Image: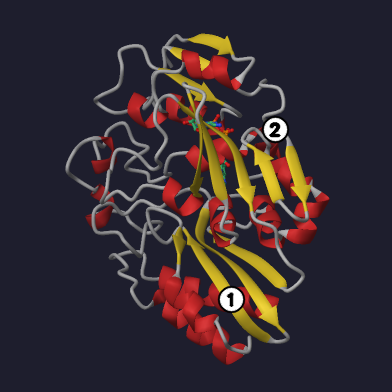
Amino acid sequence: MNKFSWYNAKSVEEALQEVNATVSEALSPKSPEAPAVFKSGGVDLLDLMKEGLVKPHKIININQIEGLDKITYDKKDGLRMGANATLAQIEAHPQIKETYLALHQAVAHAGTPQLRTMASLGGNLAQRTRCWYFRSIHHECLRKGSGTCFARDGENEYHAIMKNGACASVHASSVATALLAFDARVEIQNSKGKKNEVNLADFFVAPGDDSSRENILEADELITAVMVPPTSSKMRSYYMKQGARESYDWALADVAVVAEMSGTTCKKASVALGAAAPVPLLSKPAAQALEGKILDEATASSTAEAAMKGATPLAKNGYKVPLFKSIIKRTILAIA
Ligand SMILES: Cc1cc2nc3c(=O)[nH]c(=O)nc-3n(C[C@H](O)[C@H](O)[C@H](O)COP(=O)(O)OP(=O)(O)OC[C@H]3O[C@@H](n4cnc5c(N)ncnc54)[C@H](O)[C@@H]3O)c2cc1C
């Protein structure tokens, strides 16, 4: 690991004056000479440093910024989670469990209790993919500036089965899967003090658009909060994840369903898929298959089929298609 200096930022403004690169920029051939990057919990940043991919000159610790971990909930305004809120804080929040069950479930199944105590929400959304070619210093893959995705014709058992034409990596955040289904928004502040809100779906960048980054963040931007709209008593949600191990792991497949019900009929639905594509995906065909239907075994099966219709599995990850179908079906039946 390289030598670096450490800066404890006391405010968002102070942090934004010190930073000069996103981690994606710092690991690219266009890295500034002395990259200064943010660290919240450090779970992903330290991994990238130990892997030899990022060599920061300065680490800006944003973890001690007062109030940036605050979680507030209001029936009318919904949920607001500060970027430094840890996954453990979100998991333990009683109103999140009661009102946004799928989010609680997604967070509670991410990593281990120790990791969730360190990991922040902002860092979770900005973490880089776990694709083993990307994480290997010996592979100059598409995401690191070459023209080649090694996973497409290589070891691709954990990789994307949808939208995998340019790059077959999957996004690592399973928390994003639930947030996407709830139509969450991300608040971003820049060094000029301007605050901007974007839909979470627009926060992620597909490799076909720009393979060097996984989100829209610029060097002088910091996620300050994630907001989730209020729910109604007619809304139900559920989240399911399948990993290679039950104890701790990133998802092989995960799904979140949020449905507005009228009795046993689904009036409006949102179905989000994680670990299916390079970005977390909202499945329109799945939502359409649910809306206006009674949530029963037949609807759950046809929704799972609709969600996987456009799948383009690679040589070693065909098993993910029936895996997704199975957890989509089980998730729908869990809210029926
Ligand atoms: C064994 C293991 C299993 C895991 N399993 C899962 C899982 O199942 N699901 C899942 O979702 N995750 C999983 N993770 C990933 C883990 O949740 C993330 O690494 C963690 O949430 C990152 O948060 P952090 O605060 O530590 O981020 P950091 O490492 O501090 O930062 C990560 C990145 O985000 C940037 N950053 C941090 N905060 C901000 C901000 N506010 N604004 C802008 N940029 C910011 C940093 O510069 C860096 O690029 C797992 C990790 C491990 C090690």
Which residue matches tag 1? 268
- Say which mark, if any, is on residue 211: none
Q: Given this view, does label 2 or label 1 mark the residue nearer the observer? A: 1
Left or right: residue 310 versus residue 152 is: right
Three-letter amino acid code at disc 2?
Asp
Q: Is residue 79 above or below residue 119?
A: below
Where is 307 relative to 274, above or below?
A: below
Q: Position of residue 95 (x, y in %)?
A: 80, 53
Q: Nearer the viewer, residue 128 or 90?
A: 90
Q: Classify mark 2: helix, strand or loop.
A: loop
Residue at left offset 57%, top offset 73%: 269
Q: In the rendered image, which residue does mark 2 sit on?
A: 69
The residue carrying pointer 2 sits among few (fewer than 14), some (14 to 19) or many (20 or more) residues within 10 Å by Cα, namely many
Q: Nearer the viewer, residue 147 or 181?
A: 181
Establish whether ligand 1 lies closer than 8 Å to the Cβ of label 1: no
Distance Cα–Cα, label 2 vs label 1: 32 Å
- For the C terminus, the quadrant is bottom right
Horizontal arrangement in the rendering, residue 231 relative to residue 169 (left or right): right
Identify the residue at horizontal 53%, vertical 76% (top origin).
326
- Asked if ligand 1 lies within 8 A of label 2, the reply is no
Q: Relative to 1, is 206 above or below?
A: below
Can the viewer see residue 51? no
Image quarter hosting the N terminus: top left
Q: Earlier in the sequence, mark 2 or mark 1?
A: 2
Q: Position of residue 249 (x, y in %)?
A: 56, 50
Quadrant position of residue 27: top left
Q: Amino acid at mark 1?
A: Lys
